């Protein structure tokens, strides 16, 4: 088995060395197509071509902004400005000339609008048949408009800065005046504080004397009033004292009478014995005090209190020392100067963008960074079809396969030998294409060119297995290329080998997930365009190789039936 | 005579491709040192028989016995002793003659130096030594056929299976090929030789197997097969004037063959070659004049026609 694998492996290289068409398809054809694609489609990657685009410009503004736009367009190396009298002439240029995708109309009033701070628009007359070129030019015009707007804003900022400097000077003067005023006010405040303290002390002394005098007068008045009140109270309480005496006497008598009555009653009861019932009425009690006396007792005391005659307060008079002269307020000149200050002007910030590579790699994109791996994979697939699929069918048709098998070489060994040799040839092909791309077109080889071997190995393996599948599907030599070429071209296109994957609709990108070309291109882009490292490409390459394993199993099953 | 050793034996082979039956109950024994011819028209099943004998193709029914044993156990050993020359030019056209030979020698397990020596030897045998380093694509058709044969012999096989090895070659190359095969057979190599050329079988083969539409028509030595066909000498005669229809009646065993041989021309089947003089005498006796005549001894082709009712090759029809 191993002997068969080795001999077939060796023989495939020998066959390839004699196969001029095969060698052409391995190297010259892909380099040619890569060169054609890279040079012709390089503009998609913002790479100006050798020949400038002709852009007709109709200036109806005739202002400074229009002049700035035309001047900026003329400075753009990839643009040749053709000044047109009217839009009809400009449209004619766009329709009839090559590389003239659009015309620019600068409407009247553009400069005025921009100076007045109003938005202004230039109008692009585009040729729909030159959509890609239009897009490329629009990108440049977008940058141009941004540049002009930024320049205008810069001018405005400079003027504002000059006005601001003048204002700052005037404000400085105003601040100095205010500073002087502030110091005067401070001195005035200090003098006022001293005066206030002196006045407070004088007032306090005078107030104390006045209070003391009023206190003496009030005490005298109150004493006099108390004497008068006491006299009136004594008079008032005399009658009540008599009444109280009468009531007291009555109560004494009543007490005596009660004791007599008790004695009498006891004697009576003793005397009566069985004739108690015959006891006469008890003696009566003394008369109570009269109602008038009692009323007198309950009558409220009407006491007239003599109101003291209080002295009228006399506010002491105190003299205040003369205050300092109030500071003079800013003069009319300063106020008027403040009134004439320019209104505050705040321009909105200039919102632009700056590009940085997402993974920190080189931002500059070379179209060949896309096309060298892209067409390299495409031609790898085609070379596999020619080398392995056609080779296997030729072996069957010529009878060499039968002859090999009669020699007891196992079919598995023959297939393995062919796969291994073609895998290695494919790997070498990709390596040489990258070297050629680097030498001829300056493609990036990433941070570590050795890492390119990872996806290159994966796709070479998957492509060899894919060719085996085609060899088992195609019944004849003539059906290999129609089937194989269509499938491999579709795999390349959908897998992003010919254009960025993001150009494709969603459903196509879903299909692309099942193609090894997609994952290999992703890995190559990660290495060359994004400048990423090994960890990011291992997963993509593993998926590509995994799909290759599926192809290999299907290919072996199919080929063992087809070539048994 | 001692019984020869059986190399390979086919018993009751039956094979169909889809609905098409290509072999039906075919039996064949290949003995050591024997040359067996498989003779039959195109599409008779010769190639299928050979492929089954090489063990590349499995029969639907029947079996292949290698050295008296059935089963796959000794297939590998058998294949290593086998030289197969397919009907197509089974060569890599971009490689040189020597490179082709070395490859097939080495695949048979021969080391590089020996493969080189063996390759040069067989190139000498097929008279291509001077073209050893030329690409196959630059060789003539006959040279390619000779190289094709050489590739089947480079490893010194014990049994050689040749599938129409002289198809489409010039007479010189055909002669060369036949001499080479004869030489191998004389050296003790068993040969199974498939062809639709009767002459090649008659010259080369010890035994012949006639096949038609996948069926075994006859088997044996050339003489045995002709005898089985029951064929007689045939005489074609062209007369100047037309004779009465029954002018030949009375010649013992003779009868007219209704073959389309042309105006004024007729074919008679004779009982033996001795009747040729009687026929010419009868024409003269009837007042006729013979312009020309030809006599054909019975051949495999005649036997084939007798046995199958049609010619071995399209061009054989009515011309022999």
Image (cartoon, coloured by chain):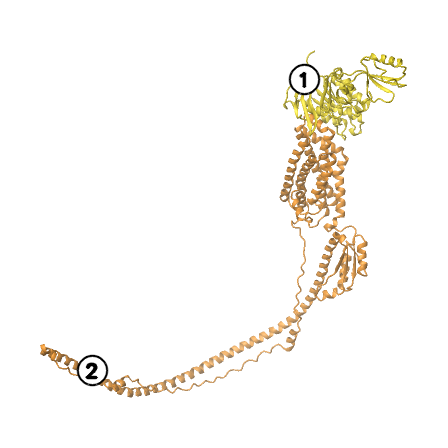
Chain colours: A orange, B yellow
Query: Crowdedness of circle 1 by 10 Å Cα count: few (<14), some, many (20+)?
Result: some
The residue sitting at 71% across, 67% down in the picture is A116
Task: Give whichever of A489, B275 is nearer the camera.
Answer: B275
Q: Is residue B108 visible?
A: no
In the picture provided, is B31 more to the left or to the right than A316? right
Question: Residue B300, position in %: x, y?
Answer: 77, 18
**What secondary structure is marked by label 1?**
strand
Task: Give whichever of A260, A181 is nearer the camera.
Answer: A260
- Picture quarter with the N terminus of chain B: top right
- Between disc 2 and disc 1, the foreground one is 1
Task: Give whichever of B64, A519 is nearer the camera.
Answer: B64
Question: Residue A152, position in %: x, y?
Answer: 71, 63
On the image, numbered disc 1 is attached to which residue?
B6
**Picture quadrant where residue A269 is located:** bottom left
- Picture quarter with the C terminus of chain B: top right
On the image, numbered disc 2 is attached to which residue?
A251
Q: Decide: is A133 above or below B209.
A: below
Question: Residue A107, position in %: x, y?
Answer: 76, 63
**Picture quadrant where residue B244 is located:** top right
Task: Give whichever of A466, B34 is nearer the camera.
Answer: B34
Q: Is residue A221 visible?
A: yes
Whether marks 2 and 1 lie on the same chain: no
Instruction: Give residue A143's mark.
Output: none
Query: Crowdedness of circle 2 by 10 Å Cα count: few (<14), some, many (20+)?
Result: some
Question: Residue A26, position in %: x, y?
Answer: 74, 38
**What secondary structure is marked by label 2?**
helix
**Picture quadrant where residue A550 is located:** top right
């Amino acid at each position: 088995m191993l002997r068969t694998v080795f001999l077939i492996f060796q023989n495939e290289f020998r066959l390839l060395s004699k196969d001029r068409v095969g060698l052409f398809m391995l190297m010259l054809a892909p380099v040619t197509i890569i060169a054609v694609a890279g040079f012709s489609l390089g503009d998609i990657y913002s790479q100006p071509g050798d020949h400038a685009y002709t852009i007709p410009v109709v200036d109806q503004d005739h202002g400074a902004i229009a002049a700035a736009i035309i001047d900026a367009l003329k400075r753009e190396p990839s643009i040749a400005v053709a000044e047109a009298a009217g839009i009809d002439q400009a449209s004619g240029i766009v329709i009839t000339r090559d590389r003239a995708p659009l015309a620019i109309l600068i409407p009247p009033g553009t400069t005025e609008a921009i100076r007045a701070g109003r938005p202004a628009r230039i109008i692009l007359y585009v040729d729909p048949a030159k959509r890609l070129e239009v897009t490329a030019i629009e990108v440049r015009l977008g940058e141009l408009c941004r540049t002009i707007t930024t320049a205008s804003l810069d001018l405005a900022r400079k003027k504002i800065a000059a006005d601001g400097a003048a204002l700052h000077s005037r404000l400085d003067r105003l601040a100095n005046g205010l500073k002087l005023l502030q110091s005067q006010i401070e001195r005035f405040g200090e003098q006022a504080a001293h005066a206030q303290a002196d006045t407070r002390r004088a007032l306090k002394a005078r107030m104390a004397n006045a209070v003391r005098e009023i206190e003496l007068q009030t005490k005298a008045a109150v004493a006099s009033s108390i004497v008068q009140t006491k006299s009136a109270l004594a008079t008032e309480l005399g009658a009540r004292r008599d009444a109280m005496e009468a009531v007291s006497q009555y109560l004494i008598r009543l007490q005596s009478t009660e004791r007599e009555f008790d004695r009498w009653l006891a004697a009576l009861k003793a005397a009566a014995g069985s004739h108690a019932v015959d006891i006469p009425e008890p003696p009566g009690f003394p008369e109570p005090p009269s109602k008038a006396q009692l009323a007198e007792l309950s009558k409220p005391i009407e006491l007239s209190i003599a109101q003291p005659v209080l002295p009228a307060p006399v506010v002491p008079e105190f003299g205040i020392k003369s205050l300092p002269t109030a500071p003079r307020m800013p003069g009319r000149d300063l106020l008027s100067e403040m009134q004439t200050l320019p209104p505050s002007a705040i321009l909105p910030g200039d919102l632009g963008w700056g590009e940085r590579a997402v993974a920190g790699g080189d931002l500059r994109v070379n179209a060949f960074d896309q096309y060298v791996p892209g067409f390299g994979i495409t031609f790898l697939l085609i070379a596999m079809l020619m080398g392995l699929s056609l080779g296997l069918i030729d072996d069957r048709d010529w009878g060499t396969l039968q002859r090999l098998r009669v020699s007891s070489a196992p079919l598995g060994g023959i297939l393995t030998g062919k796969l291994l040799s073609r895998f290695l040839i494919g790997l070498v092909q990709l390596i040489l294409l990258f070297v050629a791309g680097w030498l001829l077109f300056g493609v990036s080889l990433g941070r570590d060119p050795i890492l390119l071997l990872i996806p290159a190995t994966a796709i070479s393996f998957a492509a060899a297995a894919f060719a085996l599948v085609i060899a088992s599907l195609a019944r004849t030599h003539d059906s290999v290329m129609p089937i194989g070429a269509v499938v491999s071209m579709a795999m390349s296109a959908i897998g992003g080998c010919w254009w960025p994957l993001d150009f494709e609709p969603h459903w196509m990108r879903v299909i692309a997930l099942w193609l090894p070309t997609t994952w290999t291109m992703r890995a190559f882009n990660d290495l060359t365009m994004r400048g990423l490292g090994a960890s990011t490409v291992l997963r993509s390459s593993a998926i590509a190789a995994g799909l290759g394993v599926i192809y290999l199993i299907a290919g072996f099953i199919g080929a063992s039936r087809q070539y048994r | 005579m001692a019984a020869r050793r059986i190399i390979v034996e086919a018993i009751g082979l039956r094979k169909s491709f889809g609905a098409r039956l290509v072999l039906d109950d075919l039996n064949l024994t290949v003995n050591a040192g024997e040359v067996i011819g498989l003779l039959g028209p195109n599409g008779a099943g010769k190639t299928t028989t050979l492929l089954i004998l090489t063990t590349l193709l499995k029969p639907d029914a029947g079996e292949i016995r290698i050295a008296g044993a059935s089963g796959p156990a000794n297939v590998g050993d058998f294949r290593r002793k086998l030289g197969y020359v397919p009907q197509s030019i089974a060569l890599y056209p971009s490689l040189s003659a020597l490179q082709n030979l070395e490859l097939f020698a080495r695949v048979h397990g021969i080391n590089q130096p020996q493969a080189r020596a063996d390759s040069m030897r067989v190139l000498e045998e097929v008279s291509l030594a001077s073209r050893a380093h030329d690409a196959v694509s630059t060789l003539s058709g006959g040279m390619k056929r000779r190289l094709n044969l050489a590739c089947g012999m480079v490893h010194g096989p014990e049994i050689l299976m040749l599938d129409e090895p002289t198809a489409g070659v010039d007479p010189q190359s055909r002669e060369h090929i036949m001499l080479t095969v004869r030489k191998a057979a004389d050296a003790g190599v068993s040969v199974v030789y498939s062809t639709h050329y009767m002459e090649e079988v008659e010259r080369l083969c010890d035994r012949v197997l006639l096949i038609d539409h996948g069926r075994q028509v006859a088997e044996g030595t050339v003489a045995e097969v002709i005898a089985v066909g029951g064929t007689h000498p045939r005489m074609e005669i062209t007369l100047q004037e037309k004779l009465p229809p029954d002018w030949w009646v009375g010649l013992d065993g003779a009868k007219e063959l209704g073959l389309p041989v042309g105006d004024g021309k007729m074919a008679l089947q004779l009982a033996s070659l001795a009747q040729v003089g009687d026929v010419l005498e009868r024409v003269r006796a009837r007042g006729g004049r013979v312009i020309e005549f030809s006599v054909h001894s019975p051949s495999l082709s005649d036997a084939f026609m007798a046995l199958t009712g049609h010619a071995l090759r399209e061009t054989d029809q009515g011309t022999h």
